[in-house]
Image: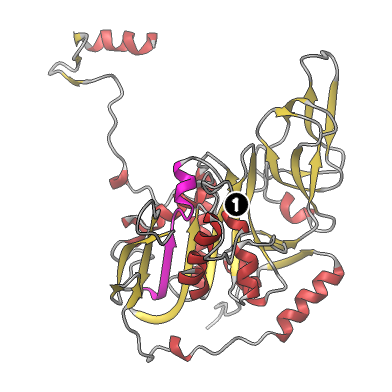
Amino acid sequence: MAGKKTSKKKVRLAHEIPQKRRKMIEKALADHEREPHPEWDKGAEWKSFTFQRKKVEPGTFRTIDFPLLEVTIGDSWPIPVTVIHGRRPGPRVCVIGGIHGDELVGPSACTHLLSPTLLGENKPLDPEQVTGTIIVIPVVNTPGYQRKLRYFPDGRDLNRQFPGNPKGSTTRRVANRLWNHIFSQVDGIIDLHSAAKGRTNMPQIRADLAHPESNLLAKTFGIEVILDSTPPKGSLRRNCVQADIPCITFEGGGADTIDHECVQIAINGIINSLRSLKMITGKPRRPKFRLLASGTTWIRTDHGGLLDMHVKCGSIMREGDIIATLADPAHPGQVVEILAPEDGLMISSAINPFVTAGMPVAHFLPISKHLGLFEDKIDSEGRFIISGSQDEIIWREEVDVDEVEVVGSGHISDDGGWVNEWLGEQTADELVDFEEEN
Ligand SMILES: [Zn+2]
């Protein structure tokens, strides 16, 4: 039979990582041997999953409250943890959002993962079809989320306190409980984040690429830009790497906002990863290329004033292109231009126009050799089109859309007019006038 292709479509791999580090990563990957997991074999014994003394039977899911603090009086801050316990034996993967309480892309993506559109019968996460166990925690830092703040109520950053301490500060105690009961007990973590207040991030994956299992997990996400970064002290990712648990961070959008495109990319990525791990059915989608990069730089302004961004986050830039201009109402007529220091990609940008000297305007990823890969896929605003960003919004089925009344409260009359509770009956003609005036 002629013409049947058997070769797999290859993903082009581009590197913008310094040679020394690249060698280190390549050596780590070459030396890496995958640990055998006979307990994940098809025929292995597979029992119910117990969490917080509650059982989840194979092929079912259950949402269980996990108290962040172990107290008998006072607030224990219970957070909902959903366990999707698959029908067949396999790895245990945890997807989390909201470790920073004001970053909403993660909570939104996790909530959609748990909606009937994705968790329903014969849907991608149907527990009857799942292999292994998927644990979803939409909002880890619930007390911060309720206060619309990044930090925990004692002012600390939960993502700098791992593995925590049962006798330490409030946040350390919480970190310790999360680490002992959940994060140290899983075979992989996808941690969803957004930029801190005042900035927005282009969707990207961050991972310590010299940790082989994290490196492999990062590539399963199906996104183009993967940043090699050694995680900060006390972060979940750092502790996972030290404990040899694969962990990746997704970054997309900014605090206090929900960016549909970022949520879409996050959901696509999680599904891609779960498919690559063979935990759910279906083929993972691969991007045309992957760029493994490091060495990002913050572009900071040397002046203050009102910032006017000329390009959007995710834009491809050539050296000398204008990123933004800065003007000061106290010094009319004087404008400072902020330029791209070299060729590259703007992976994060400021969204708050109030700036003082030293504030970051953009987070820039210099790209010396592979800019052409990006230039082939640019939208009308000069932004790189990320794999999966232009898909239909998968969680919004017709059935999910609530009907919304637009013109006050009332009903359509027999002759096609509108009976408004306050205005009385209006004819169809009057209604048109009304709509035009408003
Ligand atoms: Zn974050």
**Range of the magenta residues?**
130-146
Q: Viewer-proximal residue, 307 or 309? A: 307
Q: Can see residue 362?
A: yes
| 158 over 411 or under it: above or below | below
Name the spot of residue 246 as percent of width and height, x first. Answer: 59, 72
Decide if ligand 1 comes within 8 Å of the CB at mark 1. no
Name the residue type under label 1. Answer: Asp
Of residue 224 and residue 356, the one placed in the foreground of this image is: 356
Where residue 352 sits: x, y (%)?
66, 31
Q: Which residue is mark 1?
A: 157
Q: Residue 344: percent from the left, percent from the top?
A: 79, 49
| Viewport quadrant of the C terminus | top left
Observer-nearest of 260 and 45: 45
Label 1 secondary element: loop
**Viewer-nearest residue: 278 or 217:** 217
Residue pictured at 19% horizontal, 18% vertical: 416
